[in-house]
Image: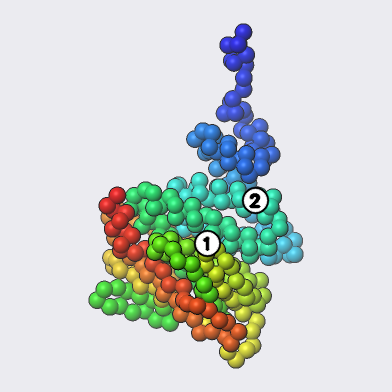
């Protein structure tokens, strides 16, 4: 009798696709996560559902009324940051981050906060997964970070390439963002790798937020406390002040010439940012980012936001594991 009842039980994976989608549409964040952890097949179905749901969400706002403009801009920036993370390994991280993005609690966030929180969550997942696996995965992820930063920078109205340079050891490019400022007011002591990781992630997250404010044509200045660090940042697209903040960002790259040529074309706008870039296995490189700001009179900060996008010591450690 018990065997007969067991045979009659319907497994989730036996349900038609339409029914599965209805089930997933009614799950809250916690239960959706439980579903993803139950089986790999359910995780794949969940990922496909979340990505499809987000595409429909994008389409609805793309075709919506003009008063939805700020939401549309936020989604455009979100999509542009995801362009370079199109590898299969990133789909699961993207899905779980979009799950948080579409959670009911996010209705209480403004668009800029929603964008920043999504990116921080997604990049933390990428950081965790890339450091757990091979050096090749780590290098690909950090190159994707760099490509994402280049893409964001080029969307600012006041973006300007200051110049290129080359030394015996590395190639470099310095860019300027006028009317823009990112700095650190205070930072708790932590391990070197922890600080570097947090700076990488929040630099991209804050940069995307500032781009949103510029695209919506709003002067903005704020602070964010995250993981023991207090960041201060601002963008002033409508400022007529004599002394406006300016931010200079320098990228120093040590690597093969084909990679340097690609990055130079990308930051110059000569390379299609949507075109996939294949990083050959065994390609070693390092990227250092240094910022300096010329402050407007209202800004006070502790230090610049310098970090390694990919450091030689980090790469050596990953290769030894």
The location of residue 83, given as percent across then percent down, is 50, 58
- Identified at 28% across, 53% down, the residue is 319
Where does residue 135 sit, x and y in percent of width and height? Answer: 33, 53
Q: Residue furthest left?
A: 168
Front residue of 193/13: it is: 193
Q: CA distance from mark 2 to mark 1?
A: 23 Å
- The relative height of residue 273 versus residue 101 in the rendered view (above or below) is below
Q: Measured along the vertical axis of the image, is residue 125 above or below residue 175?
A: above
Q: Position of residue 49 (x, y in %)?
A: 59, 42
Residue ID at (56%, 51%): 97
Q: Is residue 116 visible?
A: yes
Q: Are marks 2 and 1 in contact (CB under 8 Å)?
A: no
In the rendered image, the residue lying farthest to the front is 189
**Left or right: where does residue 253 sit relative to residue 207?**
left
Along the line of sight, the residue nearer the viewer: 131 or 119: 131
Name the residue located 58 percent from the left edge and 38 percent from the top edge: 34
- Extreme bottom residue here? 242
Name the residue that disc number 2 marks: 102
Q: Quadrant of the N terminus?
A: top right
Kindly identify the residue that appears in the image at 60 percent across and 61 percent down: 115
Q: From this viewpoint, is residue 148 visible? A: no
The circle on residue 139 is none
Foreground tag (2 vs 1): 1
235 up-or-down from 297: above or below: above
Kindly identify which residue carries mark 1: 227
Residue 24 relative to residue 167: left or right: right
- Secondary structure under tag 1 reads loop
Q: Nearer the viewer, residue 318 or 171?
A: 318
Mark 1 neighbour density, 10 Å: few (under 14) some (14–19) many (20 or more): few
- Which colour scheme appears in the figure? rainbow
**Does 230 sit above or below residue 109?**
below
> How far from the left and from the top, in percent, is residue 16?
62, 29
């Amino acid at each position: 009798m018990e065997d007969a009842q067991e045979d009659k039980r319907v497994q989730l994976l036996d349900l038609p696709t339409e029914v599965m989608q209805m089930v997933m549409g009614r799950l809250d964040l916690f239960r959706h996560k439980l579903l993803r952890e139950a089986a790999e097949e359910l995780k794949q179905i969940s990922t496909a559902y979340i990505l499809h749901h987000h595409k429909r969400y994008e389409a609805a706002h793309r075709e919506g009324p003009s008063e939805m403009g700020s939401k549309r801009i936020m989604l455009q920036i979100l999509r542009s940051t995801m362009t370079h993370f199109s590898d299969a390994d990133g789909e699961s991280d993207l899905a779980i981050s979009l799950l948080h993005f579409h959670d009911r609690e996010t209705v209480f966030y403004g668009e800029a906060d929603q964008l920043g929180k999504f990116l921080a969550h997604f990049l933390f997942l990428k950081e965790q997964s890339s450091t757990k696996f091979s050096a090749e995965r780590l290098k690909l992820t950090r190159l994707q970070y760099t490509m994402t930063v280049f893409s964001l920078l080029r969307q600012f109205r006041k973006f300007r390439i200051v110049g290129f340079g080359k030394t015996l050891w590395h190639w470099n490019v310095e860019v300027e963002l006028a009317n823009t400022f990112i700095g650190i007011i205070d930072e708790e002591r932590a391990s070197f790798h922890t600080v570097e990781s947090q700076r990488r992630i929040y630099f991209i997250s804050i940069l995307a937020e500032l781009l949103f404010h510029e695209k919506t044509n709003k002067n903005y200045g704020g602070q964010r406390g995250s993981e023991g660090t207090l960041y201060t940042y601002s963008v002033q697209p409508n400022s007529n002040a004599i002394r406006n903040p300016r931010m200079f960002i320098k990228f120093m790259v040590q690597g093969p010439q084909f990679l340097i040529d690609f990055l130079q074309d990308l930051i110059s706008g000569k390379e299609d940012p949507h075109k996939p870039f294949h990083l050959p296995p065994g390609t070693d490189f390092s990227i250092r980012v240094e910022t300096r700001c010329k402050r407007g009179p209202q800004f006070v900060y502790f230090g610049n936001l310098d970090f390694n996008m990919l450091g030689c010591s980090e790469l050596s450690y990953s290769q030894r594991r």
